[in-house]
Image (cartoon, rainbow, N blue to C red):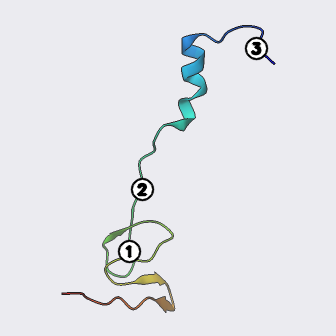
Amino acid sequence: MVPVQRKSRSQSKMGRAHKGAKATSSVRCPNCGSAKLPHAACSECGYVRPGLRLNMSKED
């Protein structure tokens, strides 16, 4: 099947408007205060939620 009418250049670009890259947000860790991704473990202290902490090993 073929479209009846061709889309204009601006209409084609507006159809792709939602595919752009979005900036990632970060939140503060409630345990140590460093920046971390939301819904992820803290890379500094390993805090996930109250009662759950991942063991972070320091590599020298």
Quadrant of the snapshot with the C terminus: bottom left
Choose mark 3 or mark 1, whichever is in front. 3
As measured in the structure, the alpha-carbon distance from the residue carrying label 2 to the one carrying label 3 is: 40 Å
Going by the numbered disc 1, the residue's amino acid type is Cys
From the top left corner, tell me how far across and down residue 6 is, in percent.
Answer: 67, 9
> Which residue sits furthest left?
60
- Tell me which corner region of the image, top left, top right, bottom left or bottom right, holds residue 8: top right
Q: Are marks 2 and 1 in contact (CB under 8 Å)?
A: no
Q: Which residue is mark 3?
A: 3
Residue 8 lies, with reference to residue 40, above or below; the image says: above
* x 38%, y 74%: residue: 29
Label 1, on which residue? Answer: 29
Q: Name the N-terminal-most of marks 2 and 3.
A: 3
Q: In the figure, is residue 1 to the left or right of 34? A: right
In the rendering, at what x and y percent does residue 25 appear?
42, 56
Identify the residue shown where x is 59% and y is 19%. Answer: 12
Q: CA distance from mark 3 to mark 1?
A: 52 Å
Image quadrant containing the N terminus: top right
Q: Which residue is mark 2?
A: 25
Q: Nearer the viewer, residue 51 or 55?
A: 55
In the depicted view, which residue is nearer to us: 27 or 12?
Answer: 12
Which of discs 2 and 1 lies nearer the camera? The answer is 2
Where residue 5 sits, quadrant-wise, is: top right
Mark pair 2, 1: CA separation: 13 Å
**Residue at x 65%, y 12% (from the top left corner):** 7
Q: Residue furthest front?
A: 1
What is the three-letter code of the residue carrying label 3? Pro
Q: Residue at x 31, y 90 (%)?
A: 57
Q: Secondary structure at mark 2?
A: loop
Where disc 3 sits, the SS reads loop
Residue type at tag 2: Ser
